[in-house]
Image (cartoon, rainbow, N blue to C red):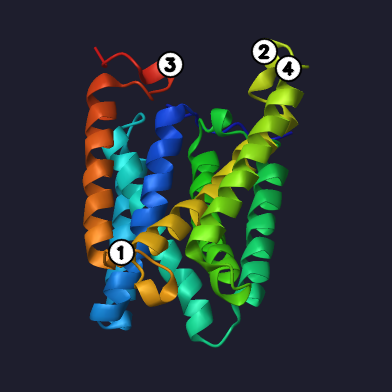
Amino acid sequence: MTTPLRTAPVRVPEITAYFWIVKILTTGAGETTSDFLGHHVNPAVVAGVGAIVLAASLVLQFRMHRYVAWTYWLAVSMVAIVGTMAADVFHGLGVPYFASTIVLALALAAIFAAWYRSERTLSIHSITTRRREAYYWATVIATFALGTAAGDMTATTFGWGYLTSGIVFAVAIVVVGIAHYVARRALTAEHRHQSTNAVLAFWLAYILTRPLGASFADWMGAPRAKGGLEWGEGTVSIALFVVIFLFVAYLAVTRKDAPADVREPPS
């Protein structure tokens, strides 16, 4: 018999259009910020400080008694930056992008396997315990690192360039969305969120949005010699974080992405 876990209020957002918009924005901001810092600051210092800030943001997130937009998206933003650094470390050690993509994909599969073996579900709608939330954030970190490596692989190893890579990943997400929609129509309403189709579609889209946002952000920041718009990594990072700030401020005030059990202000 499984030992009952102490339940905790939901600390992750509802999956709405706002979720995907801010998620994609953080992927782009994480990519260009990591690249900018890596080019202008000692990489060891950047990695050390990044790891400390990421740990602090996750501690803050876990201390919340309910979903709070600020703390959640702060943690995601730090994961985006540090996840990019982690993937870049593999390449810096001489590991080809293709190989690092395979290694990170296997690491993600191992996390999924451990999560499912422990909880018998991978649904984001079931994250109501500390342990499930720990699995969730481990998965998020792995998906960001994997997405970074995959995006760099298609852009450089495959020679597609940033813009073409972004378009390919966008098409892949559309295909996942259509497949999910078709399969979803065959299910009753009460089974849609927890179905294998819904869970698979969510995590596939979650993984693919990382290289999608990163590819377009790289395209905007990269020099024209590399097929980019040459806006500069620093400029793109600042612009994206400003937009992220505005979206998160809106969500914090309106609670439009809050789970049903925390949508109303606590009494």
Q: Nearer the viewer, residue 224 or 205?
A: 224
Q: Which residue is mark 3?
A: 260
Q: Which residue is mark 4?
A: 185
Q: CA distance from mark 4 to mark 1?
A: 40 Å
Dot 2, crowdedness within 10 Å: few (<14), some or many (≥20)? few
Q: Residue at x 68, y 39 (%)?
A: 175
Of the residues under marks 2 and 4, which one precedes in the sequence?
A: 4
Q: Nearer the viewer, residue 191 or 170?
A: 170
Q: The residue tagged with tag 2: helix, strand or loop?
A: helix
Q: Given the image, on which type of amino acid does mark 3 rest?
A: Ala
Quadrant containing the N terminus is: top right
Q: Which mark is residue 190?
A: 2
Q: CA distance from mark 2 to mark 4?
A: 12 Å
Q: Residue at x 68, y 58 (%)?
A: 110
Residue 33 location in percent, x, y?
30, 64
Which marked residue is nearer to the observer: mark 1 or mark 2?
A: 1
Q: Which residue is mark 1?
A: 33
